[in-house]
Amino acid sequence: MTASGELFDNNADTAATSLSRRPQLPFGTRVQVTNAASGASLVVRINDRGTFASTPQQPKCLDLTDGAFSRLGGSLDPDAGHIVVTETVLD
């Protein structure tokens, strides 16, 4: 179960936001996420919260499902599990 009460689907275009993010993105918020290196883009819906902390290099961390991450061109290799993205909050 996600923090919003939904059943987790690792292939859906959904994401969790960091608990340290200010302001928090409410559940249901749609965010356009674009891979800065490849230009690949998709819209994800926020349905969960993460406990991961932001860092100066990653001030607005999103935790995408494996499916969304792959569609953006990310590698599911555990040593390469981060990509730099730009994000636009749609609603």
Image (tube, helix red, strand yellow):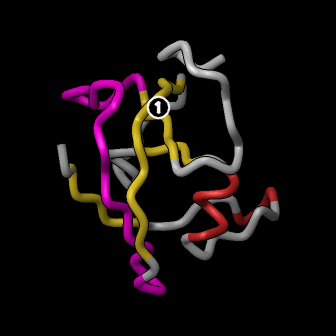
**How many marks are shown on the rendered structure?**
1
Q: Answer with left or right where residue 52 lies relative to residue 80.
A: left
x, y (%) of residue 22?
A: 22, 29
Q: Answer with left or right where residue 86 lies relative to residue 38.
A: left
Is 27 magenta? The answer is yes
Q: Answer with left or right where residue 5 lies relative to residue 39.
A: right
Q: Is 24 above or below relative to 72? A: above
**Residue under label 1:** 53
Q: Residue at x 38, y 70 (%)?
A: 34
Of the 4 image quadrants, the one containing the C terminus is top left
Task: Describe the element under mark 1 as helix, strand or loop.
Answer: loop
Q: Is 12 above or below relative to 79? A: above
x, y (%) of residue 25?
A: 27, 31
* Residue situated furthest bottom in the rendering: 38
State the image quarter where residue 85 is shown.
bottom left
x, y (%) of residue 48?
A: 49, 26
Q: Residue at x 38, y 58 (%)?
A: 43
Q: Residue at x 48, y 24 (%)?
A: 49
Q: Nearer the viewer, residue 38 or 67?
A: 67
Q: Is 16 above or below relative to 20? A: below
Mark 1 burial class by Cα count in 10 Å: few <14, some 14-19, many 20+: some
Is 22 magenta? The answer is yes
x, y (%) of residue 84?
A: 45, 67
Q: Amino acid at mark 1?
A: Ala
Numbered range of the magenta stretch? 19-39
Q: Residue at x 68, y 59 (%)?
A: 81
Q: Nearer the viewer, residue 59 or 46?
A: 46
Of the 4 image quadrants, the one containing the N terminus is top right
Q: Is 91 above or below relative to 19? A: below
Q: Main secondary structure of the magenta part?
A: loop
